[in-house]
């Protein structure tokens, strides 16, 4: 089994993306717990999370198209 060594830039990118993902996950957990403590219902929290995910998906498609056009 050969061990490939990726360029430094690739390794830094992968590490930064992993750390960013962990940070977003922790933030989401803490935010949801804070909202529960503030009296927001689980249904409302679920709807807020759903809206943010749907908006990200809706913006990703035209954003990808625009990035492809601009180069």
Image (cartoon, helix red, strand yellow):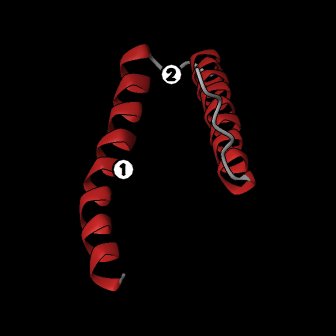
Q: Residue at x 71, y 36 (%)?
A: 19
Horizontal side of 20 relative to 60 (left or right) equals: right
| Inter-mark Cα distance, 2 to 1 | 23 Å
Which of 70/40 is in front?
A: 70
Q: What element carries label 1?
A: helix
Which of 37/11 is in front?
A: 11
Which of 14/1 is in front?
A: 1
What x and y, as percent, mark residue 34?
A: 65, 23
| Location of the C terminus (image quadrant) | bottom left
Q: Which residue is drawn at 69% across and 52% down?
A: 7
Q: Which residue is drawn at 29% across and 48% down?
A: 57
Q: Which residue is drawn at 25% across and 67% down?
A: 62
Horizontal side of 5 relative to 40 (left or right) equals: right
Q: Mark 2 points at which residue?
A: 40
Q: Please identify the quarter of the rendering in which residue 68 is found.
A: bottom left
Compare marks 2 and 1 and give the one earlier in the sequence: 2
Horizontal side of 3 relative to 46 (left or right) equals: right
What x and y, as percent, mark residue 4?
A: 63, 36
Q: Please identify the quarter of the rendering in which residue 37 is found.
A: top right
Is residue 3 depicted above or below 67 in this figure? above
Horizontal side of 35 relative to 15 (left or right) equals: left
Q: Name the residue under label 1.
A: 56
């Amino acid at each position: 089994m050969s061990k490939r060594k990726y360029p430094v830039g690739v390794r830094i990118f992968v590490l930064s993306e992993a750390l960013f993902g962990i940070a977003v996950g922790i933030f989401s957990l803490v935010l949801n717990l804070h909202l529960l403590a503030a009296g927001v219902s689980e249904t409302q929290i679920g709807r807020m999370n759903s809206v943010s995910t749907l908006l990200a998906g809706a913006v990703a498609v035209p954003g990808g198209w625009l990035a492809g056009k601009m180069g």
